[in-house]
Image (cartoon, rainbow, N blue to C red):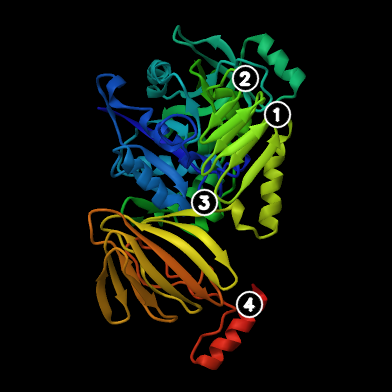
Amino acid sequence: MNHLLPVILCGGSGTRLWPLSRQHYPKQMLQLAGSHTMLQATALRIDKTFIPDGWQLQLPLVVGQEDCRFLTAEQLVQVGLKGVRILLEPAGRNTAPALTIAALTATADGDDPVMIVMPADHVIKDEQSFQQALMQALPLAENGVVVAFGVVPTSAETGYGYIRSGDRINHDGASQLTEFVEKPDSETAQQYLADGHYLWNSGIYLLRASVWLSQIKQFRPDILLACHEAISEAAIDHNFIRVERSAFMDCPSESIDYAVMEPLSQADSEHKRCAVQALNVGWSDVGAWNALMEIGEKDKNGNVLSGDVLAIASNGTLVRSENRLVACIGMQDVVVVETADVVLVAHRDQLHLVKDAVAQLKSAGRTECDIHRKVQRPWGYYDGIDEGHRFQVKRIVVSPGASLSLQMHHHRAEHWVVVKGTAKVTRGDEQFLLTENQSTYIPLGVTHRLENPGLLPLEIIEVQSGAYLGEDDIVRFEDNYSRDAVPSISHAPAINNTADLLAAKESISATH
């Protein structure tokens, strides 16, 4: 029995889609096109209904970032994919190391599956045609050929790399792969379009795991060595596979194309074992807001509107509202994106500067480039409703049966009011239940835990008050989700008495 293994590359931060996409909630986790998030749509793209006889479809193997591990797992469970293995990268090292640790994991038990390698942030409108192209390329991959999927271009696009195809290999759309080329300028892109042999590089590949390992060994043995060390020392945590940090951090950062595909395509014909399969499937990598403009449903004035939006005398404009009414009057070729804490307004010709805006925010230490006001946690989520000097208000929603860690804060006290559901509260040596409209107080320095023992979501309003309210002022003693204990902030002194507290308040207030 042959095995087909979907490998989903789920790294990257998608900064060009800020403020919707952020470091800890990147674009692959967003619902940008259709009823599923981009990760979910990718995971569901390969199903057993079209797999040929003699082949068995395996659960996907996901390579993703540590910070998004619980969100990744939860999104897969939501679409019925339980037990998916998730390889956790301590930091991004581009796609070649990601694929290498996936191939090492896939072959660890002696199996050698054919891997369909897919980035998690692509849109494919014609799923049936994509599946058909995959099946047409499967015999090539089964026999040791590395198959790259190239998208039939519909315009002289300068934002994509290109693949040059040579002589036809078969009648199913596969050709020899002769060259990879960088993103062209406008004139060169027009030449590529007129030539007819150039395809957009989709970043999707079909190949045996052992073939990838042999090619990376030939062309980049340094990457293979670092990845092998990282996987050999990996730790298993439920469905998470945590690669060894120091070895992986020492791995060179390189793409699949640079590490293997370009030198492989330049090999002489006797040793060339790569091909390109043409795709005509309504593909987009949704790299920036203009891509959503292209694939979105337009009104009679060419606008793409999402959410509570009123557009008057506006043309060629994308407006996305997440929380409130957005009224646009007299807008032309503009992008407006509203979130709970940020509003982006940009001309479509200047959208390449969104990355610069994110970089400036990061250098200024602003959190809006990293997290949303609503922050996902393995137990549910919290939403920062309001904040000011020495106080912060959050709406906390705990999933049924879930619990926060047993924790303590050095620098803040908390008041909890139950809005919906039943809360089980641990406070020091006490344990008690709270129901709707009941409340409690968690003094500074007291260990505590919030749990939801019920069958419905628990919703509370939390009011924090104190000298420092940052998320790093959490000391965890017990945690159901294997999160490391977070020490108190290094510059904050221990609080032993009232005099120390007053001194600490002055010190921390000055620092923050």
Contact between labelled residues 1 and 3, with CB atoms less than 8 Å apart: no
Identify which amino acid the numbered label 3 is placed on.
His
Identify which amino acid the numbered label 4 is placed on.
Ser
Sequence-wise first label, 2 or 1:
2
Residue for point 63% across, 39% down? 16
Most extreme residue toward the right, as rendered? Answer: 187
Within 10 Å of disc 4 (Cα), the crowding (few <14, some 14-19, many 20+) is few
Q: Secondary structure at mark 4?
A: helix
Alpha-carbon distance for marks 4 and 2? 52 Å
Within 10 Å of disc 2 (Cα), the crowding (few <14, some 14-19, many 20+) is few
Which residue is the site of mark 4? Answer: 509
Alpha-carbon distance for marks 3 and 1? 35 Å
Sequence-wise first label, 3 or 1:
3
Sequence-wise first label, 1 or 4:
1
Which residue is the site of mark 1? Answer: 330
Q: Position of residue 4 (x, y in %)?
A: 33, 29
Mark 3 vs mark 1: in front = 1
Mark 3 vs mark 2: in front = 2
Identify which amino acid the numbered label 1 is placed on.
Gly
